[in-house]
Amino acid sequence: MILQRTITKSVNTTGVGLHTGEKVNLTLHPANEGQGIVFIRSDLETPIKIQVSPFMVTETTLCSTIGNDQFKISTVEHIMSALSASGIDNIIIEVDGSEIPIMDGSSISFIHLIKSAIIKEQKEPKKFVVINESIEVKDGEKLAKFEPHKGFIIDFMIDFPHPAFNDEDSHVSIDFFKDSYIKDISRARTFGFMQEVEYLRTNGLARGGSLDNAIVLDEYKVLNEDGLRYSDEFVRHKILDAVGDLYMLGSPIIGKFTAYKSGHELNNKLLRALVENPQSWSLENLDDKDIQTAELARDYLLIANEFNNERINKIQ
């Protein structure tokens, strides 16, 4: 039986918010079985907790924001992506501001942080969201879709009318039961266009954005001196975001996610459509002793154990 996971000790880091530009302290704490992924705003007079859910996503402009009328926490998708990749089911994420720190614009810093806390198995079985029927949402030509599949695949295509975006580098398909999230996805950074950054700053946003934590493009090229980490880094970052957005379900997915020009809003609409159509999915265990799921369970454990054992200090 595949078991739930948490971390063994509390760990913390500090960074700046991409949009606020303010210093943010982030601490990860262990959590009990069945507690799920919980965010806490510790800077409020009365600290408020919120458990992840597709229906707690309140804003999707530029990032995924969770909260309610009383508080919000923005840019949660990168740390959620790292938690999904590391197989963490139960954790408390404490932050003393309204935004998760951007770090270097990817999820690799959060991967380091989670590994430093030492992942441990718990006693209760892990629950998987198994896609039983195809379901999709559209917005014009944009599309996000779930299909049944024995594993977890993200197939993503982007289309930006810009010289830096080549057709051959605009489509990536990753099988997360076979490919390495750390090597193939975790270092892909967020990106933006100079004219958009200037507009955002005049409206009080992107105050913490810089060439140190984002890929920035002018009308013709990438402005970062070191260039791209992957030739197709843009679409790989969209996959990184999607992994985090989809983990708002609180459980790993068994199925295929296909996206064309999708973003945080459409990703979340797909999750809500899925939850509201109970015949299209089920919540199940993967038993490595059950002949029906044994091969799938072995594949999942293989990649999960690779994550725990991988020497990510060499992947910078």
Image (cartoon, grey):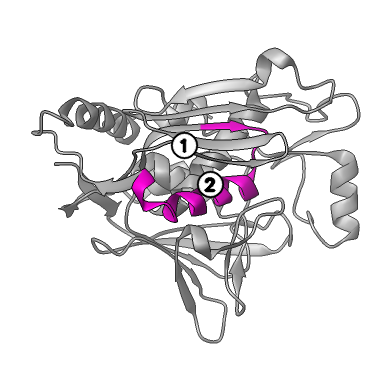
Q: Which residue type does callout 1 highlight?
A: Phe
Please give the name of the residue rendered at 60% of the width and 75% of the height, measured from the top-left corner: 71
**Magenta includes 278?**
yes
Residue beneath the point at 17% across and 55% down: 124
Give the number of the disc on residue 79. Answer: none
Question: Magenta span: helix, strand or loop, mainly?
Answer: helix
Residue at x 24% of width, y 46% of height: 284
Q: Earlier in the sequence, mark 2 or mark 1?
A: 1
Does dot 1 land on a helix, a strand or a loop?
Answer: strand
Q: Quadrant of the C terminus?
A: top right
Left or right of residue 225, residue 253 in this image: left
Q: Which of 60/311 is in front? A: 60
Q: Which residue is mark 2?
A: 270
**Which residue is the site of mark 1?**
146
Q: Can you give x and y, in whole percent of width and height, for residue 161 in the image?
A: 83, 26
Q: Is residue 295 above or below residue 34?
A: above
Residue 285 position (above or below residue 91): above
Residue 12, image x, y percentages:
46, 59
Residue segment shown in magenta: 258-280
